[in-house]
Image (tube, helix red, strand yellow):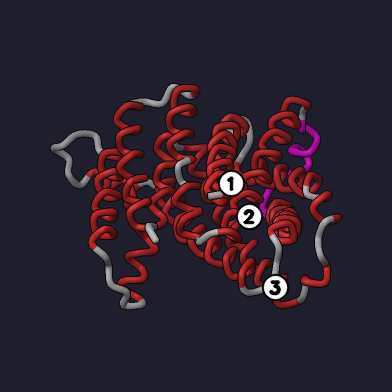
Amino acid sequence: MTWFFIALASSLMSAFAAITQKKALFNRSPLEFSFLLAVVNLVFSIPFFLAVDYVTINTSNLSILFIKSIIGVAAFLCVMTALKNLQISNALPLLALTPGFVAISAFFLLGESLKATEVIGLLSLIAGTYILESKNLKEILFPLNVFIKSKYHRYILAALFLFTASSIMDKLLLSKMNLSPISLTAFQHLFFAILFSAIFLLFNKNKGEVIINFKKQDLGWIVLISLLTIGYRYTQVVSISLASVALTLAVKRTSVLWATIIGGKIFNDSNLPKKMIAVLFILLGAILILRD
């Protein structure tokens, strides 16, 4: 059960990271924030490089990790964009829909059958999503229209697919390509810093002002978020190395419950009791689908 407590620690750190990210995004664009965080993350990742077993590092696993990092960068930007523009109790619970996307994709693309518990899990995910996004019972199609018309909800949908691919690649790197959790964490943050810096320099028109206007209070929030981010990423890959991706994600996704309850209170989100009920339905569905 060691993996469970490590995954739970990852869940709690992820929840508090999301809450502090929402706070930091009040005064920063998603790209500015992601760039600054990536640089600070790399600084705090330096001790990991001292513990890397470089004998296990090769072109193959670094290439796969670089591709995974590109996917991770895209997913992170999607989530930060949605988090800045949506209430935290609306944005984060939708990320727990990942298992449903995996199950449906496997059914249609790979011909994998769905067990009774998985079907119930999918229905629970659908019910939770409906409760989360619905205005009232009369507007049955409102949740569907939200995903069609709201561009920020579409960012969440994109992140769902990207995080699914990223998690599968984590398991490949850890179990098949001999990367340790320490090596994965170290080089991933190096690649994140390189990629976010390149994107920031290419697409941010106010790059000089962003650096100049970097205040002490900004540094405090970025440092806190960085420590939480490195913590939840490292504990997630450690848990994946000890158990299955499915089990780890099932526990990790409880972060949406903590973030919805605590973050919703802090930021005075609307209809919080209804959203908490929706989160419970979504988490139940995720757990049923991810059962081994």
Q: Which residue is drawn at 72% across and 43% down?
A: 36
Q: Main secondary structure of the magenta part?
A: helix
Please report the residue visible at 30 percent of the width from the left and 40 percent of the height from the top.
133
Query: Which label's residue is closer to the chain start, 1 or 3?
Result: 1
Verify whether residue 206 appears in magenta: yes
State the residue position of label 1: 6
Q: Nearer the viewer, mark 3 or mark 2?
A: 2
Q: How far apart are marks 3 and 2 (CA)?
A: 17 Å
In terms of depth relative to the viewer, which is nearer, 14 or 217? 14
Neighbourhood count class around disc 1 (C-alpha, 10 Å): few under 14, some 14–19, many 20 upward: many
Q: Distance between the residues labelled 2 and 1?
A: 8 Å
Image point (36%, 77%), residue name = 110
Q: Nearer the viewer, residue 86 or 118?
A: 118
Q: Which of marks 1 and 3 is in front?
A: 1
Amino acid found under the numbered disc labelled 2: Val
Mark 1: which amino acid? Ile
Percent of width and height locating residue 283: 37, 45
Q: Is residue 282 above or below residue 69?
A: above
Name the residue beneath numbered marker 3: 61
Residue 238 is labelled as: 2
Q: Residue 10, image x and y in percent?
A: 58, 44
Res. 182 mark: none
Q: What stretch is highlighted in magenta?
A: 202-214
- Residue 43 appears in view: yes
Relative image position of residue 235 (x, y in whole percent)? 63, 49
Decide: few, some or many residues near mark 2? Use Cα within 10 Å; few <14, some 14-19, many ≥20: many
Under mark 3, the amino acid is: Asn
